[in-house]
């Protein structure tokens, strides 16, 4: 989510996504995040994916070109879930990569993600086998729709249980964190001066007082259980508390 404007359907994103998912899971660590350079077979299937490296490269480029021409986020998402496992561009974990990559267009359209929670493994396997064996997508399509509807229900239920975040605190969260860190790591400097200086540098005048109040509130409730949030160490926090007490 933090890099959603930079990621997309390109080799860099897919390869690094696969690398993150496959770390320490493949027999050959060199295959992590690397386009396949050898033949593979599919368990419980007679389908044989392309094996020549040049063909795999060409087919992957064609896949990426086509998916980037699709405008509808759901069609784009489903296209990836169908075609990435069929091509098998990686040595393994192609289906996992496709399920996660299928969320990219949903994130970019600010839609609920697809979690695949409670999807029966047997149903998913049969649906993918339908693509491998017969080049038919009906089962996978129905499973996709069912899984997405279930994901949205789970997501809405969770949202109803959570408190709404403070928009101002959300907008200035990085400034608030860095200001708190600076105050604590510079115990000999007046905290008010630091806060006022940081706010004056970055915050529009109409919001300055409110942001200052948020920073002060964070400092007042600072304790050992939240130090990592601000990149602080226990020793730095203790030194700051000692200075405040004296």
Image: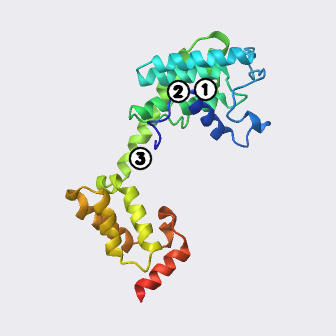
Instruction: Please state if 130 lies on the left or on the right of 91 as rendered.
Output: left
Any mark on residue 7, and which? Answer: none
Q: Is residue 64 above or below residue 99?
A: above
Q: For mark 1, what is the residue?
A: 124
Marks 2, 1: nearer the viewer: 2
Of all residues shown, which one is farthest toward the top?
A: 134
Quadrant position of the C terminus in the picture? bottom left
Mark 3 residue element: helix
Circle number at residue 158: 3
Mark 1 closeness class: few <14, some 14–19, many ≥20 residues within 10 Å: some
Q: Residue at x 47, y 85 (%)?
A: 242
Coordinates of residue 50 in the picture (x, y in percent): 72, 15
- Left or right: 148 in relation to 63: left
Query: Residue furthest toward the left?
Result: 206
Q: Which residue is mark 2?
A: 9
Q: For mark 3, does the 10 Å Cα neighbourhood hold few (<14), some (14 to 19), or many (20 or more) residues?
A: few
Earlier-in-chain disc, 2 versus 1: 2
């Amino acid at each position: 989510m933090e890099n959603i404007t930079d990621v997309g359907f390109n080799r860099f994103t897919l390869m690094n996504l696969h690398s993150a998912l496959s770390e320490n899971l493949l027999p050959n660590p060199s295959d992590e995040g690397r386009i396949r350079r050898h033949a593979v077979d599919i368990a419980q299937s007679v389908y044989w994916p392309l094996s020549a490296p040049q063909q795999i490269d060409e087919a992957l480029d064609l896949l990426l070109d086509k998916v980037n021409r699709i405008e509808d986020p759901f069609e784009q998402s489903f296209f990836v879930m169908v075609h990435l496992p069929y091509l098998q561009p990686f040595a393994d974990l192609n289906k996992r990569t496709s399920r996660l990559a299928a969320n990219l267009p949903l994130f970019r359209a600010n839609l609920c993600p697809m979690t695949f929670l409670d999807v029966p493994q047997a149903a998913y396997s049969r649906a993918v086998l339908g693509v491998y064996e017969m080049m038919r997508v009906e089962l996978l399509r129905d499973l996709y729709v069912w899984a997405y509807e279930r994901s949205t229900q789970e997501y809405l239920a969770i949202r109803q249980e959570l408190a709404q975040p403070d928009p101002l605190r959300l907008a200035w969260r990085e400034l608030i964190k860095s200001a708190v860190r600076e105050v604590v790591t510079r115990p000999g400097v007046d905290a008010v001066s630091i806060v006022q200086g940081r706010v004056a540098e970055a915050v529009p005048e109409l919001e300055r007082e409110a942001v200052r109040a948020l920073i002060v509130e964070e400092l007042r409730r600072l304790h050992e259980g939240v130090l990592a949030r601000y990149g602080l160490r226990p020793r730095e926090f203790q030194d700051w508390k000692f200075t405040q007490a004296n």
